[in-house]
Image (cartoon, rainbow, N blue to C red):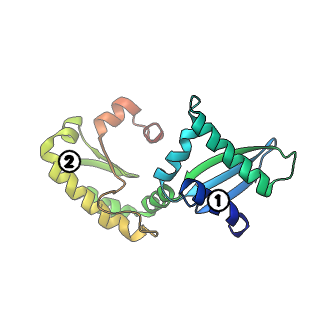
Amino acid sequence: MKKYLPFTTWIYETFGFKPLHIMTFELPDAIRLEIIFEYEKEIRFFESFGITDSLYNKEYAAQISNTFSSMYLPKGHKSLFVTFSSFAPFAISEANQKMTVGDIQSIECKYKIVWKIHNGYVLFYTIWQQNDSRNNAIKKQIIEDYYRCIKPYDEFDYISLDNVPIHFTSKEHFYKNYDGNWYNLYR
């Protein structure tokens, strides 16, 4: 990162967002520049560069590319492909992946209306159970239990009770809309 300190400083002074890390990758016909920020809200600002009818965004996109090129690349270099990503979602996903079978089963066994918990998805048996407003208290308890199980794996302290990475659905919905296939659900 020290190598790109002038560039990260420029990004911060120009856009008000400080990158956590900068990486470059040599591709066959281009150089990929990946700028990693901490939070998704930071990259959303830069993703707006894809709006074709906005000269303002095109101008900023060109600024990033031109500034990096002038600081680090030789004249006549391959084209520069700029991407943005954020660290927090990866850290949260990693905490989710570290949860043990025992952690998950301790929650599943506690609630008779829960069919299964899988990678942050809590599946009730039926769509009616999922949507029943009387289950809001149960959902709140499940969130609290999930939080207690995932928090020890939250190495960077991104997870709080307000943003527990959990989604509620149902077995019925899972089979009806995703053919009971986890891959289809996660897409």
Horizontal and vertical percent position of residue 33? 70, 51
Among the 4 quarters of the image, the one containing residue 49: top right
| Mark 2: amino acid | Ile
Quick one: 4 or 100, which is closer to the camera? Answer: 4
Q: Residue 40: percent from the left, percent from the top?
A: 48, 51
Give the image location of residue 12, x and y in percent: 58, 59
Residue 111 in view, yes or no: no
**In the image, what residue type sits under mark 1?**
Trp
Which is more toward the observer, 61 or 14?
14
Q: Quadrant of residue 158?
A: bottom left
Check the picture and name the quadrant holding the N terminus.
Answer: bottom right
Q: Is residue 156 visible?
A: yes
Residue, x 53% and y 57% (percent of image)? 16
Residue 25, percent across and down? Answer: 74, 52
Image: 137 above or below 180? below
Q: Which residue is mark 2?
A: 113
Q: Which of labels 2 and 1 is toward the front?
A: 1
C-alpha distance separating marks 2 and 1: 53 Å
Which residue carries the number 1 mark?
10
Q: Nearer the viewer, residue 119 or 75?
A: 75
| Residue at the image position 70 percent from the left and 70 percent from the top | 2
For marks 2 and 1 on the same chain, the one whose residue lies earlier in the sequence: 1
Residue displayed at 24% across by 36% down? 127
